[in-house]
Image: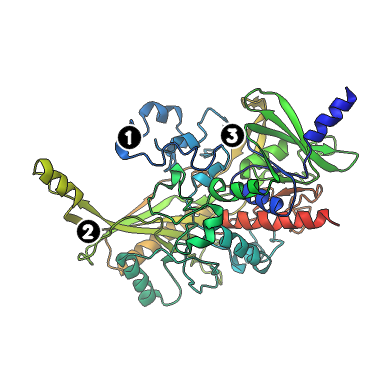
Amino acid sequence: MANLNIKNKQERTYEAIVVGSGISGAWAAKELCDLGVKTLMIERGRNVEHIKDYPTTNMLPYEFKHRNQVPEDIKNENPVVSKCYAFREDAMHFFVKDKEHPYVQEKPFDWIRGYQVGGKSLLWARHVQRWSQYDFDGPARDGFAVEWPISYDELAPWYSHVEKFAGVSGNKDGLPHLPDGEFLPAFGLNVVEKHLQESLKQNYGNDRHMIAARMAHINGSPEKFADQGRALCQSRNLCQRGCPFGGYFSSNSSTIPWALRTGNLTMRPNAVVHSVIYDEEKGRATGVRIIDAETKEMEEFYAPVIFLNAAALNTNLILLNSQSNRFPQGLGNDNGLLGKYIAFHNYRARVNGEYEGLSEYTTSGGRPVGGYFPRFRNVFKQETDFLRGYAAGFSSGRSASANTDALGMELKNNLLNPDRYGPWYVSSHMMGETIPKESNYVALDPELTDPFGIPQLRVSVDYDENDEKMTQDYIEQMSEMFEKAGFTNIRTEDDHRAPGLDIHEMGGVRMGKDPKTSLLNKHHQLHTVPNVYVTDGASMTSTSTQNPSLTYMAFAVRAAHHAVKESKK
């Protein structure tokens, strides 16, 4: 029997384990496999294969039973996830329902999750902006978090590595606080967006900019992506269904199939990670415990290198639940900071309006992109009574209608060729940087467990006075920019949404230079357990204003190469 047990353990032993198959986890697995490392990728959700498991991707509007609306009973059963803009009939099968993984909201927090192979990479908004050195310098300059242990120059080549493989459309805008990358041709701005762009130049000089958003969509140069089996973005704007063309980047269409083709990747879906196994004699992690999502049986898998990429809050949960005599408060948690300093992006405010000009133009077809305002507050110096700043999105278009008085073929032709247009609508939303605070934390509930017997996560995250001041400033400044551009009927909104609906939660296992004030070193290794790497949102020391996914991907690639280099020493 001993020999059988040894053999069984050998069959469950790999050279590396990656927990999570979303944007960052799949990148870690892809790089490890490219470097010849036999890798096990563990995913708590079901398997989703590119194209095969996109059941709604080619459905027409009339083919949906509820015309792509969410039935009232499902909304009532899911008061949290149903708030998400993409939770509709065509994509709600890619979201975790409220009862499937319960958690405790000490303060209101809308936790949006996607448990399947590919994770939320099937659902993300696909904006990809680099950080600049100003972002990495922020905490040290402003004193709102611990100092970042890495610089932009260290990360820049890994940003390039990711952009070339994923495919990023954008312009070389030459902004020092939003570095240019390896871009495919940008999707163009429409005439109103160009009008606003010119208005900013006239009224604010070089201080404020609106650019075409940089998006992880293939636009031009399709031959570069043919070996991935991906094609050009078709501008269908149905991305949340899964793209059968692979036009936008996702784990399912890109990094996972690539890793599988190396022959070095083993996938284990339906495996809920319980904890990381720590060997006190060896002083290192040796594997992970999982609970089979279907049988509820516990299994163990082993590897000398472990990457945690379960998404920010779940990575915190796994580490907090990885308790031993050496680490009674959670793996690597000597300083008691694990789970603390959670931050997010503030999406509370919007400014809408209309534009009567340029009435001779309208739009035709679709595109996956609009305009983007890079941060312009407190970039080069402190100039407001709040710390840090905000970026913003911008969109515009015209509503169309047709003459419906006719009948038969004439009515059909009228509907297909609308000839009545309203004024241009213009709309902006904010994305503000929140300040990491010790009072914003996650912790294990001492009594409540989830369906797998794992402690539920208690989430205590909220806004503060800095967020209130920033929100008001965004409303004032965007309203002023709209007025100067000649926009009218300007309406402002602060919806006071709970944190979490931004889906940009970060922190809890932050990087830093000092083991007394951080959990991870500059290579994303736990200070006290260096064979465990964390390269998802949990590792973030601060949030900046840019959409974070590109930075997660670059972190994962950089750390994977470091892990292989270390293993060869």
What distance separates the C-alpha of mark 1 from that of mark 2?
Answer: 32 Å
Q: Is residue 33 above or below residue 408?
A: below
Specify the quadrant that holds the C terminus: bottom right
| Crowd around label 2: few <14 · some 14–19 · many ≥20 (10 Å) | some
Q: Indicate the secondary structure of the residue bearing disc 1.
A: helix
Residue carrying label 3: 45
Q: Is residue 238 visible?
A: yes
Q: Nearer the viewer, mark 1 or mark 2?
A: 1
Residue carrying label 1: 63
Residue toward you, 16 or 75: 16
Residue at screen point 29% across, 36% down: 62
What distance separates the C-alpha of mark 3 from that of mark 2?
Answer: 45 Å
Amino acid marked by disc 1 = Glu
Q: Indicate the secondary structure of the residue bearing disc 2.
A: strand
What distance separates the C-alpha of mark 1 from that of mark 3?
Answer: 27 Å
Give the percent coordinates (x, y) of residue 362. Answer: 24, 61
Say whether disc 3 or disc 2 marks the residue closer to the N-terminus. 3
Amino acid marked by disc 3 = Gly
Q: Is residue 206 above or below residue 354?
A: below
Residue toward you, 347 or 153: 153
Q: Which mark is residue 423?
A: 2
- Residue that protrudes farthest toward the left in the picture: 406
Residue at screen point 77% across, 49% down: 526
Q: Nearer the viewer, mark 1 or mark 3?
A: 1
Q: Do the residues bearing badges 1 and 2 touch, measured as CB atoms within 8 Å? A: no
Q: Is residue 389 visible?
A: no
Give the percent coordinates (x, y) of residue 332. Answer: 78, 44
| Crowd around label 3: few <14 · some 14–19 · many ≥20 (10 Å) | many
| Crowd around label 1: few <14 · some 14–19 · many ≥20 (10 Å) | few
Coloring applied to the structure: rainbow
| Left or right placement of residue 219 versus residue 443 in this view | left
Say whether disc 1 or disc 2 marks the residue closer to the N-terminus. 1
